[in-house]
């Protein structure tokens, strides 16, 4: 084979670099447009991900090994820590067990009462544990990949949480992996309620820090530092009553119509290795057609339903 | 530093096997896929871009714009970015490498590094531009990766050169 670095061209080497550049650039832009606007390419993506998955799995090995090595070399001081932690966990478990018993009694009672008034039961939510294979791999995005995919019956839009609160939502499903968008992702929205007074609002991720913010809160809204926000369950995606965030800072400036409220996620969004994927909620009835419906109409509808 | 003056002379271009090229790409994808987090993620050099640029410069008729584009698509899947985002950036990277390959090969490593920085800056800018268009914001710290990638250029060139040399030597001895 003649090497390529000669400065003359005997043979036709195909189109010139400029032509190729334009061709592939246009192709990329086309793909970008299709992917960003319509999301037609998910199947191609999952096919290619199968090709890549051996490399990805291999790349996850060093991190896991490092962690195992850390676990292996437990020193004297950490042993004391472990004993102390064990004791506190034991205490915690005892108090939890008592509460759990109460909860079961309450659940039974609640079910009974709901039966009496013929309300639909609150569904028990099934869940499965998944492990993070990859942390965020793009400076721009707050996403993780977990090791359960379509083969484990993970579906788009399922909610991911840890033992303390909401972590994120499944946004893409591959055969053996799925992608979780964290609640701290820029513009990721979760409908929430303030526990103290039931105030409904929406919490948004801010993207560049691990903070959340409440937009469109009127300056006079009844919200305080340390208020806990839980999911309201109104959207039909997040089950109700799961902690999401805690208010840490409120800036009220009369010059702006809205107060600036900063929150921190309750869950260890950037911490844990194991997460819980909740199975989907039952489908809500379809959203009524958004036509010019007057308020009185809506109220009448609600009354008829209940 | 003396090694910086080592010239990659075009007349002693050594042959290189396809397996070596493919292996280097796989290793690059692997390195990109390591669990980088926090500050390290910002500092992460783009190994795939480095390896692609190296081959585009040294074997421009074998690894060109088309293959770089394909690697970009793979990188898009691996990084869960939009389809075509890495591909577009790597297309420009490969174009830079292919068009400038003769000039770059005449330079020593120090001069090469300066030129290569320009190409990486263009690549990173393309990626950030697409992200800005789609999502409406840019994380400026992302461009730190451009510097670390450039810093790795000289070590990578020397390593690859040595590996190719060793391969040739072994074949001569046997």
Image (cartoon, helix red, strand yellow):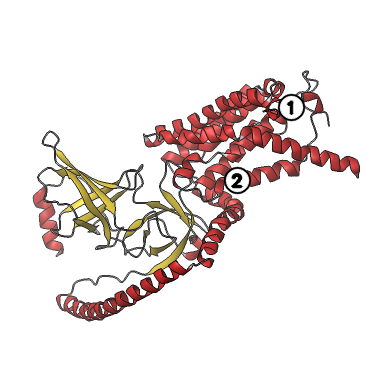
Q: Is residue A71 visible?
A: yes
| Residue under the image location 56 percent in, 35 percent down | B149
| Rendered location of residue A122, percent (x, y) | 25, 70
Give B157 or B120, whichever is nearer the viewer.
B157
> Foreground residue, A35 or B91?
B91
For the image, the number of numbered tags is 2
Between B15 and A47, the one lying in front of the other is B15
For this orientation, the residue located farthest to the right is B174
Determine the chain carrying the residue at label 2: B
Q: Is residue B155 left or right of residue A83?
A: right
> Are the residues under badges 1 and 2 in a single subunit?
yes
The image shows residue B19, relative to residue A176, as above or below, that is above
Q: Chain of mark 1?
A: B
Residue B8 image label = 1
- Mark 1 residue element: loop
Q: Is residue A142 above or below residue B12?
A: below
- The image shows residue A120 at horizontal and vertical percentages of 22, 71
Q: Which residue is mark 2?
A: B29
Residue A211: x %, y % from top left: 30, 47
**Quarter of the image with the C terminus of chain B in it:** top right
Q: Is residue B68 left or right of residue A114?
A: right
Q: Is residue B21 above or below residue B109?
A: below
Q: Position of residue A251 (x, y in %)?
A: 17, 42
């Amino acid at each position: 084979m003649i090497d390529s670095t000669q400065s003359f061209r005997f043979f036709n080497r195909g189109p010139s670099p400029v032509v190729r550049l334009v061709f592939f650039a246009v192709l990329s832009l086309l793909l970008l447009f299709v992917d960003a606007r319509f999301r037609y390419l998910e199947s191609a993506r999952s096919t290619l991900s199968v090709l890549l998955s051996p490399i990805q799995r291999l790349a996850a090995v060093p991190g896991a090994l490092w962690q195992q090595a850390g676990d292996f070399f437990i020193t004297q001081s950490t042993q004391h820590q472990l004993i102390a932690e064990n004791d506190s966990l034991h205490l915690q478990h005892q108090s939890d067990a008592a509460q759990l018993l109460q909860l079961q009694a309450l659940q039974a009672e609640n079910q009974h009462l709901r039966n009496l008034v013929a309300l639909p039961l609150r569904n028990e939510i099934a869940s499965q544990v998944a492990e993070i294979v990859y942390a965020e791999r793009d400076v721009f995005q707050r996403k993780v990949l977990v090791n359960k995919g379509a083969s484990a019956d993970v579906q788009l839009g399922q909610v991911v949480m840890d033992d303390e609160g909401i972590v994120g939502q499944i946004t893409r499903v591959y055969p053996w992996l799925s992608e979780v968008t964290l609640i701290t992702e820029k513009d990721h929205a979760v409908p929430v309620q303030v526990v103290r007074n039931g105030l409904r609002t929406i919490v948004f991720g801010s993207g560049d820090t691990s903070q959340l913010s409440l937009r469109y809160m009127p300056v006079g809204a009844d919200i305080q530092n340390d208020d806990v926000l839980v999911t309201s369950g109104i959207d039909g995606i997040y089950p109700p009553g799961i902690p999401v965030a805690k208010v840490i800072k409120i800036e009220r400036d009369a010059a702006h119509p809205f107060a600036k409220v900063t929150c921190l996620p309750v869950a260890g969004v950037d911490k844990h290795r194991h997460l819980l994927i909740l199975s989907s909620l039952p489908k809500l009835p379809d959203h009524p057609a958004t036509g010019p419906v007057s308020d009185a109409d809506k109220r009448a509808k609600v009354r008829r339903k209940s | 530093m003396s090694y910086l003056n080592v010239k990659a002379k075009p007349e002693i271009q050594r042959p290189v096997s396809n397996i070596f090229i493919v292996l280097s790409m796989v290793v690059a994808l692997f390195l990109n896929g390591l669990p980088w987090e926090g500050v390290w993620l910002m500092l992460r050099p783009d190994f795939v871009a480095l390896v692609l640029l190296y081959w585009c410069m040294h074997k421009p008729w074998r690894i060109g714009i088309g293959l770089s584009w394909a690697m970009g698509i793979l990188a898009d899947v691996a990084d869960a970015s939009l389809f075509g985002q890495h591909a577009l950036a790597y297309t420009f990277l490969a174009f830079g490498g292919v068009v400038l390959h003769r000039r770059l090969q005449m330079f020593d490593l120090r001069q090469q590094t300066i030129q290569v920085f320009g190409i990486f800056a263009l690549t990173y800018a393309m990626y950030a531009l697409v992200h800005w268009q789609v999502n409406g914001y840019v994380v400026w710290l992302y461009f730190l990766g451009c510097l670390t990638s450039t810093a790795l250029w000289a070590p990578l060139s020397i390593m690859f050169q040595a590996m190719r040399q060793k391969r040739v030597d072994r074949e001569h001895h046997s």
